[in-house]
Each structure stands twice: as structure tokens, then as C-alpha cells.
Image (cartoon, helix red, strand yellow):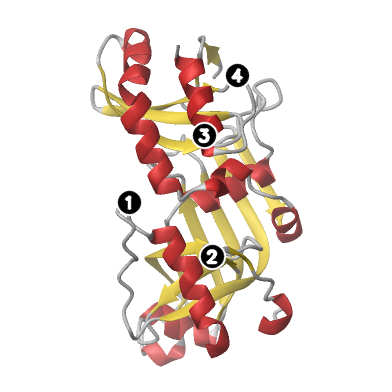
Amino acid sequence: LRTATGSLDVEQELAFSQEDVMSPLLYAPLSGGVLPNASRNELPSPPVAVRNLMELARFGQLCTMMSGMQHRRDGYPFGTVVDFAIDGAGMPILSLSPLAIHARNIIENPRCTLIVHMPGWTGLSDAMVTMFGDVRPLPRSMQAVAHDVFAAKHRTAAGHEPIVSTTSQYFRMDHIVDIYFVGGFGTVQWLSGDEYVSAQPDSVVLDRPPTRVLQELTDTFGEKARALLSPRLGGNATEPIFISYDATGAEVRVRTGGECVVHRISLPVAVQTVEQLMAAVRQALS
């Protein structure tokens, strides 16, 4: 588990085991860091893109199998929206009420899927991850550490910790069986759990809480990005919001008419810190 101050290895303690390039913008409705021409545009590999996405996203859809104790719909999938965090090994940490249907389903059958969209998801052209794995409640000795990981991910821009019910319990997907990654239209790939775990997210994604970084990017460069994109979109681009970033680019979503489109800003140099990211985006947009 990774806390706000470092990392803690808990594996043993848990006992679980359409290309259109414009300078400086890469015009690409496909998003999430991977396109069919990934090598040409120096985009992250699929395993790294998935690790980045799991770090950037805050919410997902947890799908469990209805258990017999529910007295209805036994054996049917049950989906709910949950917030989550990622520990140092890349495993999802979930805060669930033991009384909730999904928590009771997990107790009987730990097999689940967690579907995660990129922040600012607007449609099928945006990145999405479906993670297949086994979810189990963490032991009591690990609940406090799990809370630190969860709170670090969901702390507000003002520094306030998220409100977590006193009855909530932390669960962990301790075994990832498979991952289905959709990087946009035409970009689909299966990844094994080992491929995911062996990959490391870009260090810039871990440098600061992503929510704050995305807000800072939007506040600082949103209007500049909108002004550069607007002529290409018929002069009516509005509502610019940065929704993703990695070592080699950042993605901004704008509204044009009744649709939202996502564009990737390719950075002139690879970055490792948020400070370098801000400087590189400024240079790319200048």
C-alpha cells in the first residue's frame, strides 16, 4: 500500500498472494494515452497507459454477482458506482459498507470486474479499463493503512479528507486475472495481471494528487488551448478542461456545439514532475 509519505509492501501480510496532426496539438478524439499510431506519437505503452489511468481516475463501476442471501436475482451481475484508490502494487482499494449489496455479494463470491473510465469520459472514443479480479476485505490490521491510501487519492483541493462512513470497510482486489483495455475506437487490447503489475505508472502521475494537477492545468492553460483549437473546430470551442496527462502529453476536452471532443497536446520533452509538466505544456502551447 502506498501512503502519502511512502510505500509499504503488504503482499506477505495480506497473505494474498484518425490521425490529424497540428502543431503543437495532436488532433486526436481517441484518448487515454494509446492510439493505433502510438509509436509514432511517443504515447505510453498499453500497460503503462492502464496504470496511468487507474491512478488518474477516482471512480469506477464495480460489478459483482448477486448472491443467494439477497433472495432475488441470484446469479445475475450487479453493478454499482464506487470510488477507489490504487496501492503501491497497482491494486484497487475500495471503501464499501458491509451492509451494501455489493459487499455482501463479495463475501460469498469474490470474483468481480471494475470498469474505469478516463476522467471526463464523454463516450466510446475515450479510454476505458475493465479489470477482472478477486476482491476481498482487508484484515483489520490493514484498515488504517488502506484509509491513508484512500484519503490521499480523494483529498479535496482544499486539503480536506473525504467523508467515509464509520461503518465502511476497506476491500482490495488482491488478484487481477485479466484486463480489457479500450484506448478508443480501433485500440483494444487484453493485458494479463502480470503485465499490469510489472508496469509502472509515469512518475509525473504520482508526483501530486491528480485532481489538483488537472485543475491547475485547466486554470493555467485552458483558455490558451481553447483559442488554439477553436479555429480548427469552426470557431466555437468552449469549456476547455484538462482531463489527463502523462510523461509525454496532456489531454484537453472542449465542447463544440453539442459534442465534446478530446485533443492531446504532445510535449516537447518527456517529463517526470508536475513542475516539468507545467513548463512543457507552456512551451507546447506557445
Quarter residue 89 falls in: bottom right
Compared to 176, does 166 lie above or below? Answer: below
Please tell me which residue is depicted at 51% across the width and 41% down the height of the picture: 127
Q: Which residue is mark 2?
A: 113
Q: Which residue is mark 4?
A: 268
Q: Secondary structure at mark 2?
A: strand
Q: Which residue is mark 1?
A: 157
The residue type indicated by label 4 comes to Pro
70 sits left or right of 42 in the view: left
Compared to 156, does 281 lie above or below? Answer: above
Residue 243 seen in this snapshot: yes
Foreground tag (1 vs 3): 3
Foreground tag (4 vs 3): 3
Query: Which label is found at residue 275?
Result: 3
Compared to 143, does 173 lie above or below? Answer: above
Q: Earlier in the sequence, mark 1 or mark 3?
A: 1
Q: Earlier in the sequence, mark 1 or mark 2?
A: 2
Answer few, some or many: residues within 10 Å of disc 4's Cα (few below 14, many 20 plus, some between 14 and 19). few
Residue 6 place in picture, x, y as percent: 61, 63
The residue type indicated by label 2 comes to Thr
